[in-house]
Amino acid sequence: MADTALSAPNTSVASIQSSYMAQVQRRRLYGGLTLLLFVVLMVSGFTIADERNAGGFWDGLDQIGDYPADVLSEAWEKRADLPGLIAKFFPALVETINIAAVSTLIGVAGGLVLSLLGTRGLAKWPRLIPVFRRLSDIMRAIPEIVIALVLIFVLGGGPVPAMIAIAIHTAGALGKLFSEVAENADLKPVEGLASTGATWSQRMLLGVLPQVAPNYVSYGLLRFEINIRASAILGFVGAGGLGYELRNAMAWGPGRFDEAAAIFILLFGTIVFFDQVSSHYRNRLTEGQGQ
């Protein structure tokens, strides 16, 4: 009887070990197959892209520095004109920053609503949580440039299509991030407000937002950095701002490379400036929340 009792735990441990090793081997197999599939897709995708490219990637690799060298050499020859060119394109920079700022504010408001309506335990209509989550997924899945191209076709060129496109993408992205933060909020204040007869809006405003505000503001500032770059990129498709001026300067070619250099300086300096300011305030918010 004693031998039987001792052998039973040993058999159980052995079966657990064998099951664990089988799971480890299965995970390694799946990981290896995934890595192999990734490599095959990368190689095949690069091969197809290289075949369809006009000149071929490897053939033009040695010329990759020609364009920057031409821009820098012409900018250096006309370096005395750079301050005047920077002043000339400063209004376009202001337009780019305005596009990013307005689209960020609209996107934050939209993301706030989507997050609260799509978070379990907070949603006003729990049955519609999947609807708001899928809506958020769709809004952030479509690239800004695709939305901007459609809106430019409908509304014409200018900053408005860029603002709407960036705001839609921002609302979808922040809706996901905000929802993850709201899921960790303490529900006791919400339940206390509900017991006093507070409306859903009052429960969200007084019970949830004070808890999540630091993270929400931090994500909003981070998104503002991203939107500055996005608004500059959308200028290449006719959405106005500094990107539109940069496209014209680059398309003109030699003779206006000094203008391209001035725009690069403005854009780079602006991105670095707002990146530092945003990082400073995000760190302060994070430290304040930790305290």
Image (tube, rainbow, N blue to C red):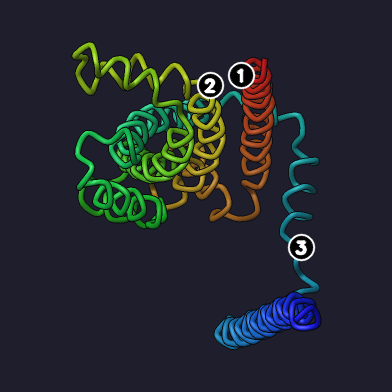
- Are the residues tagged 3 and 2 within 8 Å (C-beta)? no
Question: Mark 2 or mark 1: which comes first in sequence?
Answer: 2
- Are the residues tagged 2 and 1 within 8 Å (C-beta)? yes
- As drawn, 154 above or below 31: above
Provide residue 192's location: percent of width, then percent of height: 32, 16
Image point (64%, 49%), residue name: 255
- Report crowding for label 3: few under 14, some 14 to 19, many 20 or more residues within 10 A (C-alpha): few
Number of numbered discs on residues? 3
Provide residue 165's location: percent of width, then percent of height: 35, 45
Q: Which residue is mark 2?
A: 214
Q: Measure how far apart labels 1 and 3 are at the Cα level.
A: 49 Å
- As drawn, 206 above or below 150: above
Q: Nearer the viewer, mark 3 or mark 2?
A: 2
Image point (63%, 44%), residue name: 260
Provide residue 277's location: percent of width, then percent of height: 65, 22
Q: Quadrant of residue 158?
A: top left
Q: Which residue is mark 3?
A: 66
Image point (67%, 79%), residue name: 23
